[in-house]
């Protein structure tokens, strides 16, 4: 009697198909996640002439990345772990890394769709027109920023096992990032908070995306923000994997 172990490519394909199917069946929650940044871009139309189109687009994309990384990915992982989905998957001939890789790839695909949607809405509604290179570099910067928030979500779900506590924690972090991040960027909360916000995950991602949308404005500050983004992603990702429990 022989036991056939499926190839890694076949396993990954099956996992991706299942995860995309789950995402499609929960498309109502997906629409809500994508709706928030689109509404932000539309409501900030009056700021295009004052702050520039890149600022408006980067703000919408940053808020969308926070929504996907914290509200979407983290709560999905916590819910499936609580229901025993990961336990059942690990019984089969499935490598642990393929399970998480499939989930992350689905979220990255969502980030790509969200970024394209914001570009389209910004152009059609806010009349924001950027050079082709700006859209390309801004797109890749959004994916990089999304990796940071996915790793932060992985850290939260790694440190907290109870799905209800995960849900409340992600909502609290989401609120802090949105309110303190936006108000701090405007300088409403003072110079000290503004400086802290600029080097927080919210600030560095927003800076990288805004500058990437206008690559000719790239400077040393943007380079430091890029390095900080990579550093945050590495630290959050390593700790999130280290403390994550499958059951």
Image: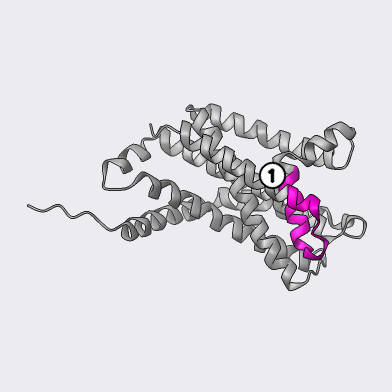
Q: Which residue is drawn at 82% across and 55% down?
A: 55
State yes or no: residue 66 in magenta. no
Residue 163 drawn at (x, y percent): 49, 30
Mark 1 surroundings within 10 Å by alpha-carbon count, few (fewer than 14), some (14 through 19), many (20 or more): some
Magenta span dominant secondary structure: helix
Q: Residue at x 37, y 60 (%)?
A: 13
Q: Is residue 234 left or right of residue 25?
A: right
Direction left: furthest residue: 1
Residue farthest along the bottom direction in this orientation: 132
Horizontal and vertical percent position of residue 63: 70, 47
- Say which element carries label 1: helix
Which residue matches tag 1? 228
Residue 130 drawn at (x, y percent):
79, 69
Quadrant where the C terminus lies? top left
Where in the figure is residue 184, as x and y percent of width and height? 83, 38
The answer to which of 154 and 178 lies nearer the viewer is 154
The stretch in magenta equals 203-224
Q: In this view, does 192 lie above or below 97?
A: above
Regarding residue 71, the answer to whether it shows in the image is no
Q: Which residue lies furthest to the right in this view?
A: 50
Residue 10: quarter of image: bottom left
């Amino acid at each position: 009697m022989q036991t056939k172990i499926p190839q890694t490519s076949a396993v990954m394909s099956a996992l991706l198909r299942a995860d995309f199917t789950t995402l499609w069946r929960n498309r109502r929650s997906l629409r809500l996640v994508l709706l928030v940044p689109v509404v932000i871009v539309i409501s900030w139309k009056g700021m295009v002439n004052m702050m520039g189109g890149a600022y408006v687009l980067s703000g919408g994309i940053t808020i969308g990345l926070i929504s996907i990384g914290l509200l979407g990915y983290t709560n999905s992982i916590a819910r499936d772990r609580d229901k025993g989905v990961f336990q059942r998957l690990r019984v089969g001939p499935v490598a642990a890394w393929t399970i998480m890789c499939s989930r992350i790839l689905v979220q990255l695909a969502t980030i790509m769709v969200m970024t394209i949607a914001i570009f389209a809405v910004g152009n059609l509604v806010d009349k924001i027109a950027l050079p082709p290179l700006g859209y390309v570099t801004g797109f890749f910067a959004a994916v990089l920023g999304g990796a940071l928030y996915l790793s932060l979500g992985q850290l939260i779900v790694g440190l907290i096992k109870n799905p209800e506590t995960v849900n409340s924690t992600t909502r609290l972090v989401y609120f802090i990032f949105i309110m303190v991040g936006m108000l701090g960027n405007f300088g409403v909360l003072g110079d000290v908070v503004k400086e802290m916000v600029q080097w927080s995950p919210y600030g560095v991602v927003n800076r990288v995306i805004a500058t990437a949308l206008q690559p000719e404005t790239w400077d040393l500050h943007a380079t430091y923000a890029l390095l900080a983004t990579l550093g945050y992603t590495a630290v959050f990702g390593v700790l999130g994997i280290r403390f994550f429990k499958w059951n």
